[in-house]
Image: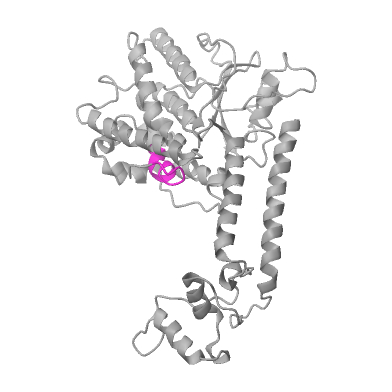
Amino acid sequence: RQARKNRTMVISINLALAISLLAATAFPCVSFSPSSSYTDTRRPLSLASELSYRVERVDPARRPGGRRLGRLANSNRGQSTGGGPSSLYDDAPKNKPWTFGILTSGFPPQQLLVPFVKFLTFNVWRLMMNELVTHDSDGRFVRESFQAGNDPSPLDLPAAGRSRYRLYLGNPCPWCHRVKATMAILGLDADIPTTTLIDDAEKASKGGWILPRPSPSDAENIADELVTGDLAGVYNFCYRDILDEGERYSGRCTAPLLVDAESGKIVTNESNEIMILLNDYARRKQDMEESAKTDLRPVGMEAELDGATKKWFDLLWNGAYRCGFATSQLAYDEAAADVLRGLREMDDHLASSRFLLGDAITEVDLKNFAWVTRHDYAYTVIFKSPGGRIAQYSNISRYVKELVEDYPMLLDSVDLPDACGSYYRQLFMLNFGRVVPYVPSVREWIAAL
Protein backbone atom coordinates (compact mmCIF):
# COMPACT_ATOMS: atom_id res chain seq x y z
CA ARG A 1 0.00 0.00 0.00
CA GLN A 2 2.89 2.34 0.82
CA ALA A 3 4.55 1.59 -2.52
CA ARG A 4 1.31 2.43 -4.31
CA LYS A 5 1.13 5.75 -2.46
CA ASN A 6 4.72 6.53 -3.41
CA ARG A 7 4.06 5.83 -7.08
CA THR A 8 0.97 8.04 -7.00
CA MET A 9 3.01 10.82 -5.40
CA VAL A 10 5.67 10.59 -8.12
CA ILE A 11 3.03 10.87 -10.85
CA SER A 12 1.38 13.83 -9.14
CA ILE A 13 4.68 15.66 -8.69
CA ASN A 14 5.68 15.13 -12.33
CA LEU A 15 2.35 16.38 -13.61
CA ALA A 16 2.41 19.37 -11.27
CA LEU A 17 5.93 20.32 -12.41
CA ALA A 18 4.92 20.05 -16.04
CA ILE A 19 1.85 22.23 -15.63
CA SER A 20 3.73 24.78 -13.53
CA LEU A 21 6.60 25.07 -15.98
CA LEU A 22 4.39 25.36 -19.02
CA ALA A 23 2.20 27.95 -17.34
CA ALA A 24 5.13 30.00 -16.05
CA THR A 25 6.89 30.10 -19.41
CA ALA A 26 3.77 30.65 -21.48
CA PHE A 27 1.92 33.43 -19.68
CA PRO A 28 4.31 36.24 -20.74
CA CYS A 29 3.37 35.65 -24.37
CA VAL A 30 -0.26 34.56 -24.05
CA SER A 31 -2.98 36.39 -25.93
CA PHE A 32 -6.35 36.27 -24.20
CA SER A 33 -8.04 37.73 -27.24
CA PRO A 34 -9.92 35.29 -29.50
CA SER A 35 -9.13 37.47 -32.48
CA SER A 36 -6.91 35.86 -35.13
CA SER A 37 -5.34 39.28 -35.88
CA TYR A 38 -3.34 39.34 -32.63
CA THR A 39 0.21 40.56 -33.30
CA ASP A 40 3.33 39.75 -31.30
CA THR A 41 6.30 41.95 -32.17
CA ARG A 42 8.83 39.21 -31.39
CA ARG A 43 9.91 37.07 -34.32
CA PRO A 44 9.48 33.26 -34.16
CA LEU A 45 12.56 31.08 -33.91
CA SER A 46 11.67 28.21 -36.28
CA LEU A 47 10.48 27.80 -39.86
CA ALA A 48 7.34 25.97 -38.76
CA SER A 49 6.34 28.71 -36.33
CA GLU A 50 7.31 31.37 -38.92
CA LEU A 51 4.80 30.01 -41.43
CA SER A 52 2.11 29.70 -38.78
CA TYR A 53 2.91 33.23 -37.61
CA ARG A 54 2.53 34.71 -41.08
CA VAL A 55 -0.50 32.80 -42.27
CA GLU A 56 -2.72 32.71 -39.17
CA ARG A 57 -1.59 35.22 -36.55
CA VAL A 58 -0.46 38.34 -38.45
CA ASP A 59 -2.65 41.10 -39.82
CA PRO A 60 -0.45 42.45 -42.66
CA ALA A 61 -2.12 45.86 -42.49
CA ARG A 62 -0.88 46.36 -38.91
CA ARG A 63 2.81 45.53 -39.46
CA PRO A 64 5.62 47.36 -41.22
CA GLY A 65 6.17 45.68 -44.56
CA GLY A 66 2.81 44.03 -44.16
CA ARG A 67 2.06 43.90 -47.87
CA ARG A 68 5.17 41.87 -48.54
CA LEU A 69 4.31 39.42 -45.74
CA GLY A 70 0.72 39.28 -46.92
CA ARG A 71 1.80 38.33 -50.43
CA LEU A 72 4.06 35.62 -49.01
CA ALA A 73 1.22 34.25 -46.91
CA ASN A 74 -1.07 34.18 -49.91
CA SER A 75 1.58 32.44 -51.98
CA ASN A 76 1.55 29.62 -49.46
CA ARG A 77 -2.19 29.23 -49.93
CA GLY A 78 -2.07 29.31 -53.71
CA GLN A 79 -4.49 30.97 -56.13
CA SER A 80 -7.62 29.48 -57.69
CA THR A 81 -9.48 30.61 -60.79
CA GLY A 82 -11.04 34.00 -60.29
CA GLY A 83 -8.25 35.22 -58.00
CA GLY A 84 -9.70 33.75 -54.78
CA PRO A 85 -7.80 31.61 -52.27
CA SER A 86 -7.18 27.95 -53.02
CA SER A 87 -9.83 25.52 -51.78
CA LEU A 88 -7.04 23.31 -50.44
CA TYR A 89 -6.78 25.41 -47.29
CA ASP A 90 -9.17 26.60 -44.62
CA ASP A 91 -9.29 29.87 -42.76
CA ALA A 92 -8.50 29.70 -39.07
CA PRO A 93 -11.79 29.06 -37.23
CA LYS A 94 -13.05 31.85 -35.01
CA ASN A 95 -13.89 29.38 -32.26
CA LYS A 96 -10.63 27.44 -32.29
CA PRO A 97 -9.47 26.11 -28.89
CA TRP A 98 -7.54 28.50 -26.71
CA THR A 99 -3.80 27.76 -26.38
CA PHE A 100 -0.79 29.22 -24.59
CA GLY A 101 0.84 29.99 -27.93
CA ILE A 102 4.16 28.57 -26.79
CA LEU A 103 5.37 27.19 -30.12
CA THR A 104 4.39 30.29 -32.09
CA SER A 105 5.83 32.79 -29.63
CA GLY A 106 9.35 31.42 -29.55
CA PHE A 107 9.55 31.65 -25.76
CA PRO A 108 10.80 29.58 -24.09
CA PRO A 109 13.29 28.59 -26.78
CA GLN A 110 12.14 25.54 -28.71
CA GLN A 111 15.58 23.96 -28.27
CA LEU A 112 14.92 23.81 -24.52
CA LEU A 113 11.18 23.26 -24.49
CA VAL A 114 10.96 20.24 -26.82
CA PRO A 115 13.61 18.07 -25.08
CA PHE A 116 12.09 18.85 -21.68
CA VAL A 117 8.53 17.96 -22.73
CA LYS A 118 9.79 14.80 -24.45
CA PHE A 119 11.66 13.74 -21.33
CA LEU A 120 8.72 14.45 -19.05
CA THR A 121 6.04 12.78 -21.17
CA PHE A 122 8.21 9.72 -21.85
CA ASN A 123 8.89 9.10 -18.19
CA VAL A 124 5.25 9.56 -17.18
CA TRP A 125 4.23 7.23 -20.02
CA ARG A 126 6.81 4.60 -19.04
CA LEU A 127 5.68 4.74 -15.41
CA MET A 128 2.08 4.17 -16.53
CA MET A 129 3.12 1.28 -18.79
CA ASN A 130 5.00 -0.39 -15.95
CA GLU A 131 1.91 -0.08 -13.77
CA LEU A 132 -0.22 -1.69 -16.49
CA VAL A 133 1.97 -4.70 -17.34
CA THR A 134 5.25 -6.27 -16.28
CA HIS A 135 8.53 -5.45 -18.04
CA ASP A 136 12.11 -6.58 -17.67
CA SER A 137 15.03 -4.17 -17.23
CA ASP A 138 15.33 -3.74 -21.02
CA GLY A 139 11.72 -2.75 -21.54
CA ARG A 140 10.46 -6.10 -22.82
CA PHE A 141 6.85 -6.99 -22.01
CA VAL A 142 6.65 -10.07 -19.77
CA ARG A 143 3.33 -11.91 -19.74
CA GLU A 144 3.04 -13.17 -16.21
CA SER A 145 0.79 -16.03 -15.22
CA PHE A 146 -2.17 -14.93 -13.11
CA GLN A 147 -3.57 -18.42 -12.95
CA ALA A 148 -6.15 -19.02 -10.26
CA GLY A 149 -8.31 -21.92 -9.22
CA ASN A 150 -8.00 -25.53 -8.25
CA ASP A 151 -6.30 -28.31 -10.14
CA PRO A 152 -8.87 -28.67 -12.95
CA SER A 153 -10.63 -32.01 -13.14
CA PRO A 154 -13.05 -33.12 -15.89
CA LEU A 155 -16.25 -31.12 -15.90
CA ASP A 156 -19.38 -32.93 -14.77
CA LEU A 157 -22.03 -33.49 -17.40
CA PRO A 158 -25.23 -31.55 -16.65
CA ALA A 159 -27.70 -33.19 -14.31
CA ALA A 160 -31.40 -32.72 -15.06
CA GLY A 161 -30.50 -30.33 -17.85
CA ARG A 162 -28.81 -27.82 -15.51
CA SER A 163 -25.11 -27.03 -15.58
CA ARG A 164 -23.20 -26.31 -12.39
CA TYR A 165 -20.67 -24.12 -14.20
CA ARG A 166 -20.57 -20.53 -15.40
CA LEU A 167 -18.19 -18.88 -17.87
CA TYR A 168 -17.18 -15.22 -17.76
CA LEU A 169 -16.07 -13.90 -21.15
CA GLY A 170 -15.34 -10.43 -22.51
CA ASN A 171 -15.75 -9.72 -26.23
CA PRO A 172 -12.62 -7.51 -26.62
CA CYS A 173 -10.26 -10.11 -25.13
CA PRO A 174 -8.66 -12.55 -27.62
CA TRP A 175 -8.16 -15.14 -24.87
CA CYS A 176 -11.90 -14.99 -24.19
CA HIS A 177 -12.61 -15.09 -27.92
CA ARG A 178 -10.84 -18.43 -28.34
CA VAL A 179 -13.00 -19.90 -25.54
CA LYS A 180 -16.19 -18.48 -27.05
CA ALA A 181 -15.23 -19.92 -30.45
CA THR A 182 -14.67 -23.31 -28.79
CA MET A 183 -18.12 -23.16 -27.24
CA ALA A 184 -19.63 -22.35 -30.65
CA ILE A 185 -17.79 -25.06 -32.58
CA LEU A 186 -18.61 -27.73 -29.98
CA GLY A 187 -22.22 -26.59 -29.61
CA LEU A 188 -22.01 -25.99 -25.86
CA ASP A 189 -23.75 -22.62 -25.63
CA ALA A 190 -26.85 -24.23 -24.14
CA ASP A 191 -24.83 -26.39 -21.71
CA ILE A 192 -22.77 -23.82 -19.83
CA PRO A 193 -24.23 -20.36 -19.05
CA THR A 194 -22.01 -17.47 -20.07
CA THR A 195 -21.80 -14.00 -18.55
CA THR A 196 -20.68 -11.48 -21.16
CA LEU A 197 -18.47 -8.99 -19.36
CA ILE A 198 -18.36 -5.26 -20.09
CA ASP A 199 -14.98 -3.53 -20.24
CA ASP A 200 -15.29 -0.39 -18.14
CA ALA A 201 -12.28 0.32 -15.95
CA GLU A 202 -13.88 3.48 -14.58
CA LYS A 203 -16.73 1.52 -12.99
CA ALA A 204 -14.80 -1.61 -11.99
CA SER A 205 -13.45 -1.69 -8.43
CA LYS A 206 -10.39 -3.51 -9.76
CA GLY A 207 -9.27 -4.57 -13.21
CA GLY A 208 -11.44 -3.61 -16.15
CA TRP A 209 -14.48 -5.91 -16.20
CA ILE A 210 -17.96 -5.28 -14.82
CA LEU A 211 -20.95 -7.63 -14.95
CA PRO A 212 -24.12 -6.79 -16.88
CA ARG A 213 -27.48 -6.51 -15.16
CA PRO A 214 -28.57 -10.13 -14.57
CA SER A 215 -31.74 -11.53 -16.09
CA PRO A 216 -34.25 -13.27 -13.81
CA SER A 217 -33.09 -16.68 -15.05
CA ASP A 218 -29.43 -15.78 -14.33
CA ALA A 219 -30.23 -14.94 -10.73
CA GLU A 220 -31.91 -18.26 -9.96
CA ASN A 221 -30.09 -20.70 -7.67
CA ILE A 222 -26.82 -18.79 -7.75
CA ALA A 223 -25.05 -16.47 -5.33
CA ASP A 224 -25.65 -12.77 -5.98
CA GLU A 225 -21.91 -12.14 -5.97
CA LEU A 226 -21.54 -14.30 -9.09
CA VAL A 227 -24.01 -12.31 -11.20
CA THR A 228 -23.82 -8.72 -9.91
CA GLY A 229 -21.10 -6.12 -9.48
CA ASP A 230 -17.80 -6.68 -11.23
CA LEU A 231 -15.35 -9.48 -11.92
CA ALA A 232 -13.27 -8.50 -8.89
CA GLY A 233 -16.31 -9.28 -6.75
CA VAL A 234 -16.52 -12.74 -8.31
CA TYR A 235 -12.87 -13.40 -7.40
CA ASN A 236 -13.40 -12.10 -3.86
CA PHE A 237 -16.41 -14.38 -3.41
CA CYS A 238 -14.64 -17.45 -4.80
CA TYR A 239 -11.72 -16.90 -2.39
CA ARG A 240 -13.90 -16.09 0.62
CA ASP A 241 -12.81 -19.22 2.50
CA ILE A 242 -9.10 -18.36 2.46
CA LEU A 243 -9.30 -14.56 2.76
CA ASP A 244 -9.49 -12.88 6.14
CA GLU A 245 -12.63 -10.93 6.94
CA GLY A 246 -12.58 -7.69 4.95
CA GLU A 247 -9.61 -8.83 2.86
CA ARG A 248 -9.81 -8.74 -0.92
CA TYR A 249 -8.24 -10.96 -3.57
CA SER A 250 -4.80 -9.49 -4.32
CA GLY A 251 -4.13 -11.05 -7.74
CA ARG A 252 -5.19 -9.87 -11.19
CA CYS A 253 -8.90 -10.37 -11.90
CA THR A 254 -8.62 -11.73 -15.42
CA ALA A 255 -10.96 -13.32 -17.93
CA PRO A 256 -11.78 -15.87 -19.25
CA LEU A 257 -12.93 -17.38 -15.97
CA LEU A 258 -14.66 -20.72 -15.37
CA VAL A 259 -16.47 -21.02 -12.04
CA ASP A 260 -18.22 -23.90 -10.33
CA ALA A 261 -21.41 -22.05 -9.42
CA GLU A 262 -22.59 -24.73 -6.98
CA SER A 263 -19.52 -24.60 -4.78
CA GLY A 264 -18.64 -20.99 -5.57
CA LYS A 265 -15.07 -21.96 -6.45
CA ILE A 266 -12.88 -21.07 -9.41
CA VAL A 267 -12.16 -24.00 -11.72
CA THR A 268 -9.54 -22.11 -13.77
CA ASN A 269 -8.92 -18.77 -15.45
CA GLU A 270 -6.39 -20.07 -17.97
CA SER A 271 -7.78 -20.11 -21.52
CA ASN A 272 -5.83 -23.18 -22.68
CA GLU A 273 -7.09 -25.21 -19.73
CA ILE A 274 -10.66 -24.05 -20.28
CA MET A 275 -10.50 -25.14 -23.93
CA ILE A 276 -9.16 -28.56 -22.94
CA LEU A 277 -11.88 -29.01 -20.32
CA LEU A 278 -14.61 -27.96 -22.77
CA ASN A 279 -13.34 -30.32 -25.46
CA ASP A 280 -13.20 -33.22 -23.00
CA TYR A 281 -16.71 -32.36 -21.82
CA ALA A 282 -18.01 -32.30 -25.42
CA ARG A 283 -16.25 -35.57 -26.27
CA ARG A 284 -17.93 -37.41 -23.36
CA LYS A 285 -21.27 -35.82 -24.16
CA GLN A 286 -21.03 -36.86 -27.80
CA ASP A 287 -20.16 -40.41 -26.77
CA MET A 288 -23.18 -40.53 -24.46
CA GLU A 289 -25.53 -39.13 -27.11
CA GLU A 290 -23.85 -40.99 -29.98
CA SER A 291 -23.79 -37.74 -31.94
CA ALA A 292 -21.38 -36.48 -34.60
CA LYS A 293 -17.97 -35.80 -33.15
CA THR A 294 -15.91 -32.64 -33.42
CA ASP A 295 -12.66 -33.11 -31.55
CA LEU A 296 -10.46 -30.04 -31.21
CA ARG A 297 -7.77 -31.92 -29.28
CA PRO A 298 -7.54 -35.46 -30.72
CA VAL A 299 -5.98 -38.10 -28.51
CA GLY A 300 -2.37 -38.68 -29.52
CA MET A 301 -1.88 -35.15 -30.89
CA GLU A 302 -1.52 -33.38 -27.56
CA ALA A 303 2.24 -32.80 -27.82
CA GLU A 304 1.98 -31.48 -31.38
CA LEU A 305 -0.89 -29.19 -30.45
CA ASP A 306 0.99 -27.80 -27.46
CA GLY A 307 4.09 -27.30 -29.63
CA ALA A 308 2.11 -25.43 -32.28
CA THR A 309 0.45 -23.29 -29.62
CA LYS A 310 3.85 -22.39 -28.19
CA LYS A 311 5.28 -21.49 -31.60
CA TRP A 312 2.49 -19.20 -32.78
CA PHE A 313 2.06 -17.71 -29.31
CA ASP A 314 5.71 -16.63 -29.21
CA LEU A 315 5.79 -15.28 -32.76
CA LEU A 316 2.33 -13.78 -33.35
CA TRP A 317 -0.35 -14.09 -30.68
CA ASN A 318 1.84 -12.65 -27.95
CA GLY A 319 4.28 -11.06 -30.38
CA ALA A 320 1.72 -8.35 -31.15
CA TYR A 321 1.45 -7.53 -27.43
CA ARG A 322 5.23 -7.50 -27.09
CA CYS A 323 5.31 -4.84 -29.81
CA GLY A 324 2.56 -2.76 -28.24
CA PHE A 325 3.82 -2.87 -24.67
CA ALA A 326 7.54 -2.49 -25.40
CA THR A 327 9.07 0.48 -23.58
CA SER A 328 12.39 0.48 -25.43
CA GLN A 329 13.42 0.38 -29.08
CA LEU A 330 15.38 -2.82 -28.47
CA ALA A 331 12.33 -4.58 -27.04
CA TYR A 332 10.15 -3.43 -29.94
CA ASP A 333 12.66 -4.43 -32.62
CA GLU A 334 12.94 -7.94 -31.19
CA ALA A 335 9.18 -8.38 -31.06
CA ALA A 336 8.66 -6.90 -34.53
CA ALA A 337 11.19 -9.32 -36.00
CA ASP A 338 9.25 -12.24 -34.48
CA VAL A 339 5.95 -10.97 -35.89
CA LEU A 340 7.41 -10.62 -39.38
CA ARG A 341 8.89 -14.09 -39.18
CA GLY A 342 5.60 -15.51 -37.91
CA LEU A 343 3.57 -13.97 -40.73
CA ARG A 344 5.99 -15.30 -43.31
CA GLU A 345 6.12 -18.80 -41.83
CA MET A 346 2.35 -19.03 -41.37
CA ASP A 347 1.70 -17.94 -44.94
CA ASP A 348 4.26 -20.46 -46.24
CA HIS A 349 2.78 -23.27 -44.13
CA LEU A 350 -0.78 -22.58 -45.30
CA ALA A 351 0.30 -22.74 -48.95
CA SER A 352 0.07 -26.53 -48.68
CA SER A 353 -2.37 -26.99 -45.79
CA ARG A 354 -5.93 -25.95 -44.96
CA PHE A 355 -5.25 -25.91 -41.21
CA LEU A 356 -2.36 -25.02 -38.93
CA LEU A 357 -2.00 -28.62 -37.79
CA GLY A 358 -3.34 -31.81 -39.33
CA ASP A 359 -6.18 -32.17 -41.81
CA ALA A 360 -9.04 -30.94 -39.60
CA ILE A 361 -9.80 -27.98 -37.39
CA THR A 362 -8.13 -28.03 -33.97
CA GLU A 363 -7.84 -25.78 -30.94
CA VAL A 364 -4.83 -24.10 -32.58
CA ASP A 365 -6.99 -22.75 -35.42
CA LEU A 366 -9.43 -21.20 -32.95
CA LYS A 367 -6.62 -19.54 -31.02
CA ASN A 368 -5.27 -18.22 -34.30
CA PHE A 369 -8.69 -16.93 -35.39
CA ALA A 370 -8.83 -14.72 -32.28
CA TRP A 371 -5.46 -13.22 -33.25
CA VAL A 372 -6.00 -12.82 -36.99
CA THR A 373 -9.32 -10.98 -36.64
CA ARG A 374 -7.65 -8.29 -34.50
CA HIS A 375 -4.44 -7.96 -36.51
CA ASP A 376 -5.49 -5.38 -39.10
CA TYR A 377 -7.49 -2.90 -37.03
CA ALA A 378 -5.96 -3.22 -33.55
CA TYR A 379 -2.51 -4.76 -33.52
CA THR A 380 -1.04 -3.08 -36.62
CA VAL A 381 -2.23 0.34 -35.48
CA ILE A 382 -2.22 0.81 -31.72
CA PHE A 383 0.42 -1.90 -31.09
CA LYS A 384 2.55 -0.95 -34.12
CA SER A 385 2.70 -4.64 -35.04
CA PRO A 386 4.48 -4.82 -38.43
CA GLY A 387 3.83 -6.78 -41.58
CA GLY A 388 0.91 -4.94 -43.15
CA ARG A 389 -2.62 -6.20 -43.68
CA ILE A 390 -3.69 -9.83 -43.74
CA ALA A 391 -4.93 -9.30 -47.31
CA GLN A 392 -1.26 -9.07 -48.35
CA TYR A 393 -0.83 -12.75 -47.40
CA SER A 394 -2.75 -14.81 -49.93
CA ASN A 395 -2.56 -18.12 -48.08
CA ILE A 396 -3.57 -16.71 -44.69
CA SER A 397 -6.45 -14.89 -46.41
CA ARG A 398 -7.66 -18.08 -48.10
CA TYR A 399 -7.34 -19.96 -44.81
CA VAL A 400 -9.54 -17.45 -42.97
CA LYS A 401 -12.19 -17.49 -45.69
CA GLU A 402 -12.33 -21.29 -45.81
CA LEU A 403 -12.46 -21.48 -42.02
CA VAL A 404 -15.61 -19.36 -41.78
CA GLU A 405 -17.15 -21.11 -44.80
CA ASP A 406 -16.81 -24.47 -43.06
CA TYR A 407 -17.68 -23.08 -39.62
CA PRO A 408 -19.99 -20.05 -40.12
CA MET A 409 -20.69 -19.88 -36.39
CA LEU A 410 -17.24 -18.27 -36.04
CA LEU A 411 -18.64 -15.12 -37.64
CA ASP A 412 -20.82 -14.58 -34.58
CA SER A 413 -18.05 -15.31 -32.09
CA VAL A 414 -16.80 -11.70 -32.04
CA ASP A 415 -18.11 -8.16 -32.41
CA LEU A 416 -15.09 -6.78 -34.25
CA PRO A 417 -15.78 -3.01 -33.95
CA ASP A 418 -16.28 -3.41 -30.20
CA ALA A 419 -13.29 -5.73 -29.81
CA CYS A 420 -10.82 -3.55 -31.70
CA GLY A 421 -12.35 -0.33 -30.44
CA SER A 422 -11.73 -1.42 -26.86
CA TYR A 423 -7.97 -1.24 -27.39
CA TYR A 424 -8.28 2.46 -28.26
CA ARG A 425 -10.80 3.25 -25.53
CA GLN A 426 -9.18 1.43 -22.62
CA LEU A 427 -5.43 1.48 -23.34
CA PHE A 428 -5.32 5.26 -22.98
CA MET A 429 -1.58 5.27 -22.36
CA LEU A 430 -1.19 4.11 -25.98
CA ASN A 431 -3.89 6.44 -27.31
CA PHE A 432 -3.95 9.65 -25.29
CA GLY A 433 -6.36 11.31 -27.71
CA ARG A 434 -8.90 8.49 -27.23
CA VAL A 435 -9.86 8.68 -30.91
CA VAL A 436 -11.26 5.35 -32.13
CA PRO A 437 -10.68 4.58 -35.84
CA TYR A 438 -13.17 2.98 -38.18
CA VAL A 439 -13.41 -0.80 -37.75
CA PRO A 440 -15.56 -2.96 -40.09
CA SER A 441 -17.63 -5.94 -39.03
CA VAL A 442 -15.91 -9.31 -39.19
CA ARG A 443 -18.01 -10.19 -42.25
CA GLU A 444 -16.95 -7.01 -44.06
CA TRP A 445 -13.33 -7.59 -43.15
CA ILE A 446 -13.30 -11.18 -44.41
CA ALA A 447 -15.14 -10.24 -47.62
CA ALA A 448 -12.34 -7.76 -48.42
CA LEU A 449 -9.53 -10.32 -48.03
Q: Is residue 286 above or below residue 432?
A: above
Q: Is residue 49 above or below residue 337?
A: below
| Place of residue 206 in the rendered image (x, y in percent of width and height, measured from the top left) | 67, 33
Camera-nearest residue between 183 and 219: 183
Is residue 234 inside the magenta stretch? no
The image quadrant of residue 252 is top right
| Place of residue 150 in the rendered image (x, y in percent of width and height, measured from the top left) | 59, 12
Is residue 384 inside the magenta stretch? yes
User: Does the rendering let one see residue 294?
Assistant: no
Q: Quadrant of the N terminus?
A: top right
Badge count: 0
Camera-nearest residue between 56 and 343: 56
Q: In which quarter of the image is the C terminus?
A: top left
* Magenta-colored span: 373-385
Camera-nearest residue between 377 and 77: 77
The image quadrant of residue 87 is bottom left
Left or right: 122 in relation to 338: right
Left or right: 323 in relation to 57: left
| Place of residue 102 in the rendered image (x, y in percent of width and height, measured from the top left) | 61, 68
Q: Which residue is drawn at 62% across and 66% down?
A: 108
User: Does the rendering let one see residue 326?
Assistant: yes
The image quadrant of residue 164 is top right
Q: Is residue 389 above or below residue 145?
A: below
Q: Residue at x 47, y 43 (%)?
A: 420
Left or right: 340 in relation to 378: left
Q: In this view, does 292 lie above or below 116?
A: above
